[in-house]
Amino acid sequence: MRQIFLDTETTGLSADNGDRVIEIGCVELLHRKLTGNNLHFYLNPERDSHEDALRVHGITNEFLKDKPKFAEVVDQFLEYVAGAEIIIHNAPFDVGFLNKELELQGRKPFTSYVDGITDTLVMAKEMFPGKRNSLDSLCDRLEVDNSGRTLHGALLDAELLADVYINMTRGQDALLMEVESNSDEQTRTTEHVDLSSFQLPVISASEQEISQHADVLAQLDKSSGGHTVWRIFEKSVA
């Protein structure tokens, strides 16, 4: 299974009002192992970042002036993500911006190129209801080292998200590994045993046990309004 952890940084909060993507970071996980085959772009958005956004990511307009425009990297980006499961924290935000960038290039929506999108924010809310589930909060809760995250950065955040996701799903993975291991062991050690020579004792219920059992059945039958399976069967064979 090929999974891509993706994050973006933008000039602001509204793609519909003209804000643009300025950074894309992607981290590849293949069969639950980080491959190092990551993808990272800084992009020239052809507009300035809002002051609030600049305080979050610290990527200046001057730094982005000589960086490629999205149109120059779109083919490489789509080839990289093609057919993968994309994992994003707060997916509607990033996907909305990517859809707008693709629309400006006359391309299909982002979901047309990938195998599906998983939102770790939704996962976290289900796992930790009522708690803060920002990426920083999840790093603290799951003991993922985020000490280098003084500012938001798409590649760093994608790397942290990969660690968070692996920790969030580790229980499921361990269970699957245990089942597979036990299955293999049983396959290797199973032997056919002839039971025909064994004499198994038959222990009959005592009168007291039979009476107690009948009382329990009567109570169940009363609770169900006479619709228990054994009563229906008794009537059908009577």
Image: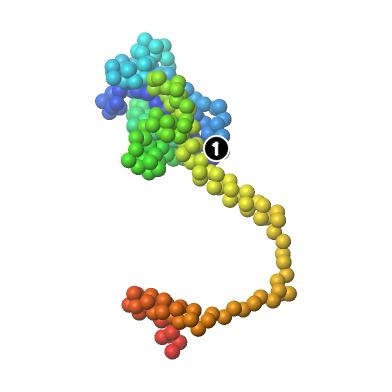
Give the residue at x 36% y 13%: 60
Q: Secondary structure at mark 1?
A: loop
Q: How many marks?
A: 1
Q: Is residue 138 visible?
A: yes
Q: Is residue 214 above or below residue 150?
A: below
Picture quadrant where residue 20 is located: top left
What is the image's colouring?
Answer: rainbow
Q: Nearer the viewer, residue 31 or 184?
A: 184
User: At which x and y percent is residue 169?
Assistant: 48, 41
Residue 53 vs residue 228, the one in the foreground: 228
Q: Residues within 10 Å of mark 1 (few under 14, many from 20)?
A: some
In this view, the residue in front, 219 or 63, is 219
Q: Residue at x 39, y 39 (%)?
A: 124
- 172 or 17: which is nearer to us? 172
Height in image: 177 above or below 109?
A: below
The residue positioned 54% from the left and 80% from the top of the image is 205
| Above or below, comparing residue 172 to residue 28 in the picture | below
Q: Position of residue 234 (x, y in %)?
A: 43, 84
With 125 as the anchor, is 36 left or right in this view?
right
Quarter of the figure that contains the N terminus: top right
Q: List the single residue furthest toward the bottom.
A: 238
Say which residue label 1 marks: 32
Question: Which image quarter holds the C terminus?
Answer: bottom left
Rendered location of residue 6, percent (x, y): 44, 30
Q: Residue at x 38, y 44 (%)?
A: 126
In the image as oriented, which residue stretches furthest toward the top?
62
Q: Is residue 220 above or below residue 78?
A: below
**Is 237 displayed left or right of 176 in the figure?**
left
Disc 1 marks which amino acid? Arg
Q: Position of residue 74 (x, y in %)?
A: 44, 25
Q: Which of the 4 quarters of the picture holds residue 93?
A: top left
Q: Is residue 81 visible?
A: no
